[in-house]
Image (tube, grey):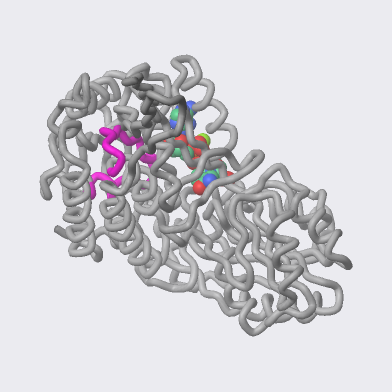
Amino acid sequence: MDDNWAAADGLHHFIGNRWVVAASGQTLDVIDPSDGRPFAKIARGNSADVDAAVRAAQRAFGEFGDGAWGRLSAAERGRLLARLAARVAECGEELARLESRTTGKPLRQGRADAAALARYFEYYGGAADKLHGATIPYQPGMTVLTIREPHGVTGHIIPWNYPLQIFGRSVGAALAAGNACVVKPAEDACLSLLRVAELAAEVGLPDGALNIVTGLGAEAGAALAAHPGIDHLSFTGSPATGTRVAQAAAQHHCPVTLELGGKSPQIVFADADLDAAVAVIVNAIVQNAGQTCSAGSRLLGERPIYEELLARVGDAMSRLRVGPALADLDVGPLIRHSQLQRVQQYLSQARADGIALAAQGRIVDDAPPAGFYQAPALLRDVPASHRIAQEEIFGPVLAAMPFDTEAEALAIANGTPYGLVAGVWTRDGARQLRLARKLACGQVFVNNYGAGGGIELPFGGVKSSGYGREKGFEALAAFTRLKTVAIRHG
Ligand code: NAI
Ligand code: MG
């Protein structure tokens, strides 16, 4: 297997452990963001394909959890996931190259993502047989117990920014809990996931436990969200699409987990260890060219060190080189032309509104001209209410602003529609804890920052960043439903 795995005559859906041609017979081009050229074809799925995948998953689960997948013991499921983890690790380089080629991310990020996928399967494989209910003290002569049952068939709508990682966190946990999965990856970047599905079949996942339907969001994605056979839905992507998906799921009362991005602040106090902070702050906004839900996209600096912070972050940013994914430079291209246009519109609005560019990285001279490249930009003194400081740009654009007091920092930090992650940089222990308590978000990092990392750490948002938690042991509960059994025995 090599980069040409996907090249020949195009890829199909993966349903019931087999390649299945799109019902429509239609295909979509996959574009390489590094040069803007199509290099592979995928199936253009519609509701008929989604229906076939849901039926395959329902068979695998079985009406009473007695299908080929549903009847496996938790230990057996765990063992299969462990085997898949090992197989993913063996194929790590191949997966990393597919991931980098389709998303545009530098190869070492593709490698990190493939390693994270293996780790998700390892982690959730190990958790499969440690998930259980409880007994509840109730009335004399009665025993009450709770049973954690899988939902049945879970749907997973995955975005293009971290296909391997986001697949790992939601599908890994769903399978561990005993669900059969139907996955709709993003049309832009799904090749790595099709390959993972093939690996899952290879290690012995029963037919239908894991199914992938490719295609457009408005077609295959909408059909999956609306399908009455889906018992739980996980979505990661934009707030607008998340709303649509949740509305469709509500028509059949299907529980939903939504992860909708953020505008996460990095709050740097005057007593912070700037030597430690600067590289982390820069990485948190340029990793994956800023197309990370948990990107640290706002930089709040306490007035006495604000200029020094800007100078040091700006210096690091101006050294960054942007180029093709497989050249493995600091930053790759954005996912597609429309995303590049979107980022450029934000930058021209900033210019028009008099917001100063403090520093910018550089696109290498030999980067293909038709690639979707954006030099990372540091904008200074951005008013906290400006669009640049409020909206998720999803590009390598860092909005810096000064603050004078802890209360002001907190008000700015919490003052967007989002609430996903926050970074706090200070040596003051009491302040660390105060802010950790008062920040309105799902994760707080103190003197470190984990954009996209941390398999073991529960992750998710508040407000428009979504609801529900993925990652860590906590995530498993959402992929089960609790049944209470009350027995009177006298
Ligand atoms: P999107 O939210 O539309 O797409 C994410 C996924 O949803 C893809 O698999 C897509 O095919 C699917 N989808 C799209 N429309 C759908 C529908 N009507 N029903 C069901 N599924 C549907 O995101 P898009 O358009 O690719 O990017 C726009 C913006 O969204 C980005 O600039 C960024 O701000 C945000 N975004 C945030 C992500 C995150 O990790 N939180 C990931 C991707 C995008
Ligand atoms: Mg969209």
Quadrant position of residue 180: top left
Query: Which residue lies at the image location 36% right of the left edge and 31% below the top edge?
Result: 145
> Is-magenta flag for residue 443?
no
Position of 209 with respect to 150 (left or right) is left
Which one is in front, 134 or 248? 134
Query: Which residue lies at the image location 66% right of the left edge and 39% below the top edge?
Result: 463
Find residue 237 and report its horizontal and vertical position in percent: 51, 41
Image quarter where the C terminus lies is: top left
Find residue 387 and report its horizontal and vertical position in percent: 75, 47
Position of 141 with respect to 26 (left or right) is right
Find residue 46 and report its horizontal and vertical position in percent: 32, 23
Q: How many marks?
A: 0
Find residue 36 and report its horizontal and vertical position in percent: 41, 52
Image quarter where the N terminus lies is: bottom left
Query: Which residue lies at the image location 58% right of the left edge and 77% below the top edge?
Result: 279
Position of 407 with respect to 160 (left or right) is right
Quadrant position of residue 231: top left
Res. 356 visible in picture: no
> Is-magenta flag for residue 187?
yes
Residue 84, compared with residue 236, is above or below; it is below
Which one is in front, 152 or 333? 152
Position of 357 with respect to 257 (left or right) is right
Query: Range of the magenta residues?
Result: 176-196
Res. 178 visible in picture: yes
Query: Which residue lies at the image location 56% right of the left edge and 42% below the top edge?
Result: 260
